[in-house]
Image (spheres, helix red, strand yellow):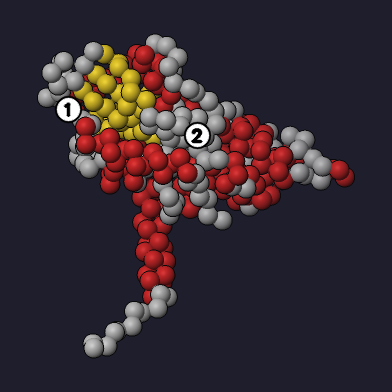
Amino acid sequence: MSIQWFPGHMHLTRKAIGERIKDIDVVIEMLDARLPGSSANPLLAELTSGRPTLKVVNKQDMADPERTALWLAHYNAQAKTQAIALDASVTAPARAIIAACHELAPNRGGMVKPMRVLICGIPNVGKSTLINTLLGKRSAKTGDEAGVTRNEQRLALADDFYLYDTPGMLWPRIVVPESGYNLAASGAVGRNAYDDQEVALELLVKLKTAYPALVEARYQLGWTLAQMASTPEEDLLEAIGRKRGALSGGAQVNGQKAAELVIADFRSTSLGLITLETPAEFLRWLAAGEKIDAERTLRKGEGKPKPRNRRKR
């Protein structure tokens, strides 16, 4: 199954970014620390015309700190880019954003040349929470549902620092299947765009490989780590459902309830601090996805009827 979610208001956001970027000095892209590669919007490089970029790896308090360090090094190695990790509800790290923007655009500042910053990111990544923290008041709507912010907002963080907030935006087609599942697991896509059981199974594939001890600690299955890693994810989901009482009539495991339980445990960090991808893993997924997408585009082009040559009169 390919997970896709691009409702109508995201087309408007894409257009708004394209129009606004002409007046922008720095672009802040907020990423989810649990899936930094999958939550990075590939459209932004095209839309933002090579502007200096600050990658804010948000929700670090929910992610694996060792993997967060790998992602920071990955992004900081890129040209015209800085990356910092934070928890958007913590005031001190959030304030570091202003300093980082001035480093990326040192010639901006003061009333004559105020800093103009565009902040963007996928739905439910924490932009509104961060903005409220920066302003010290509740100015932006927040929520745990994708698509809360719907309109662009201009906010003054200082007399010479303007922040333009845009609604959360995914991209028209997700070409990396693993990213689609990771985005769904994190809550970045609408509920009608995915099947809970498929997402939970893909989530368990990653958990039993990278974090088997956390799975055992949470669900107390009595399995060895080797047994955990070698067990098919379908059997693992059934065992979790049975252990946690996600049952239907006749003591049968209810797959839907078990899937919802696993996803909820991941989102709430009840399973522990988890990051679903490393930079190396994501780059492999991306290369494979782009290759398949290119082949698909080629086949689609070959299937079109060739235009007939018109005879000259």
Secondary structure of the residue carrying numbered label 1: loop
Q: Which residue is mark 2?
A: 147
* Residue at the spot 41% in from the left edge and 63% down from the top edge: 292
Q: CA distance from mark 2 to mark 1?
A: 30 Å
| Camera-nearest residue between 73 and 45 | 45
Q: In percent of the image, x 43 and y 17: which residue is there?
A: 139
Residue 48 image point, x, y percent:
26, 40
Question: Mark 1 — residue?
Answer: 105
Q: Position of residue 307 (x, y in %)?
A: 34, 79
Secondary structure of the residue carrying tag 2 is loop
Q: Classify mark 2: residues with Cα within 10 Å, few (<14), some (14-19) or many (20+).
A: many
The residue furthest right is 250
First of labels 2, 1 by sequence position = 1
Choose top left, top right, bottom left or bottom right for residue 70.
top left
Left or right: where 114 falls relative to 255: left
Q: Are marks 2 and 1 in contact (CB under 8 Å)?
A: no
- Nearer mark to the viewer, of 2 and 1: 2
Left or right: residue 302 versus residue 6 is: left
Evaluate whether residue 100 shows in this view: yes
Name the amino acid type tagged 1. Ala
Q: Residues within 10 Å of mark 1 (few under 14, many from 20)?
A: some
- Residue 43 drawn above or below residue 216: below
Residue type at tag 2 = Gly
Farthest-out residue, front: 313
